[in-house]
Image (cartoon, helix red, strand yellow):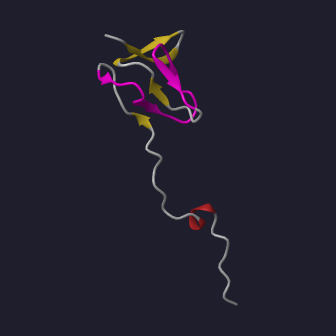
Amino acid sequence: MAHTKAGGSTRQKGNRRGKRLGVKLFGGQTVKSGNIIVRQKGSQVNAGTGVAMGKDFTLYAVNDGTVKFSRHEGKKMVSVQTA
């Protein structure tokens, strides 16, 4: 009988591309309105002033300026400082 045994999840899924998550623009870099700053799953980094969060937790710039990362009450924050 030529049956394939249940191989678990590793056999069933092929190689998939990564999700390309992470920080796209770092602190001190200039940013234009609409540029993506951080791609993430969940809100590891929160939005500060000049930054908005999309429905998939992507942080993007609302204003033109300079990216600044900081901590506020123990949470990571990213903001855009206008020149």
Q: Residue 14 location, x and y as percent?
A: 52, 65
Q: Is residue 66 left or right of residue 6?
A: left
Asked which quadrant contains residue 9, the reply is bottom right
Seen at 35% across and 25% down, the residue is: 32
Query: Does residue 55 lie above or below 20 as drawn?
Result: above
In x, y percent, where is residue 59? 48, 28
Q: Quadrant of residue 56?
A: top right
Q: Position of residue 27 (x, y in %)?
A: 33, 21
Q: Residue furthest right?
A: 1
Q: Nearer the viewer, residue 62 or 45?
A: 62
Identify which residue is drawn at 67% across, 76% down.
5
Whether the magenta-drawn stretch holds residue 77 is answered as: no
Query: Is residue 83 left or right of 21 when viewed as pictured?
Result: left
The image shows residue 34 at horizontal and vertical percentages of: 42, 29
Is residue 32 shown in magenta?
A: yes
Which quarter of the rendering shows the N terminus? bottom right
Q: Look at 43% across and 35% down and name the residue there.
A: 22
- At x 49% / y 15%, what residue is drawn? 48
- Residue 24: tell me if it is visible: yes
| Count of numbered badges drawn on the protein | 0
User: From this viewpoint, is residue 45 visible?
Assistant: no
Quarter holding the C terminus is top left
Instruction: Report the side of 4 relative to 50 (left or right).
Output: right
* Region in magenta: 29-54
